[in-house]
Image (tube, rainbow, N blue to C red):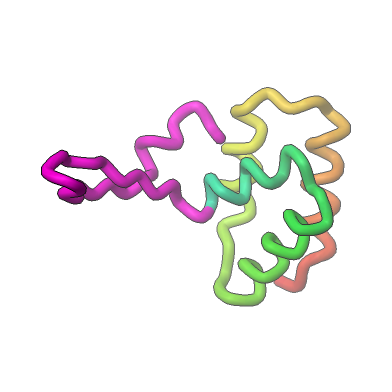
Amino acid sequence: MPPDWLDHAETMNSDVYERTAVVVCPSIEDVIVAKLHRLAEKDVTFIKACAEARPMDRVRILDRFRATGPDLLLIVRAESLFASLAP
């Protein structure tokens, strides 16, 4: 996840067994950033489904990805994946 992922996350308090639990939901962009680090088949499938479901801000996602300090090979793989997706 990017260093500032909590700034983009949604939170909600929920009462569970007389205690308050805080539910944190990261933004879809930040979930994609996390998946770009592995790029297993299921991660690629997820990212492709996200791209088909709605437009993605690819520049923002890649900027957040770069902010995590990945190796150059991972950056190349991520850029290649995004280049292969329909606009």
73 on left or right of 16: right
Q: Where, quadrant-wise, is the N terminus in this rendering?
A: top right
Height in image: 67 above or below 23? Answer: above
10 on left or right of 19: right
Height in image: 71 above or below 41? Answer: above
Height in image: 64 above or below 70? Answer: below
Name the image quarter holding residue 64.
Answer: top right
Residues 44 and 85: in front is 44
Relative image position of residue 32 (x, y in whole percent): 62, 50
Residues 32 and 87: in front is 32
Q: Which residue is drawn at 58% across and 62% down?
A: 56
Q: Where, quadrant-wise, is the C terminus in this rendering?
A: bottom right
Q: What stretch is highlighted in magenta?
A: 1-28
In the picture as drawn, the residue positioned furthest to the left comes out as: 18
Residues 68 and 58: in front is 68
Q: Which residue is drawn at 51% across and 55% down?
A: 28
Relative image position of residue 59 (x, y in whole percent): 62, 49
In the picture as drawn, the residue positioned furthest to the bottom comes out as: 53
In the picture as drawn, the residue positioned furthest to the front comes out as: 17
Is 21 in the magenta? yes
Residues 5 and 12: in front is 12
Q: Which residue is drawn at 44% across and 31% down?
A: 4
Q: Residue at x 19, y 50 (%)?
A: 14
Name the image quarter holding residue 41.
Answer: bottom right
Name the image quarter holding residue 71.
Answer: top right
Relative image position of residue 16 (x, y in whole percent): 20, 48
Relative image position of residue 54 (x, y in whole percent): 55, 73
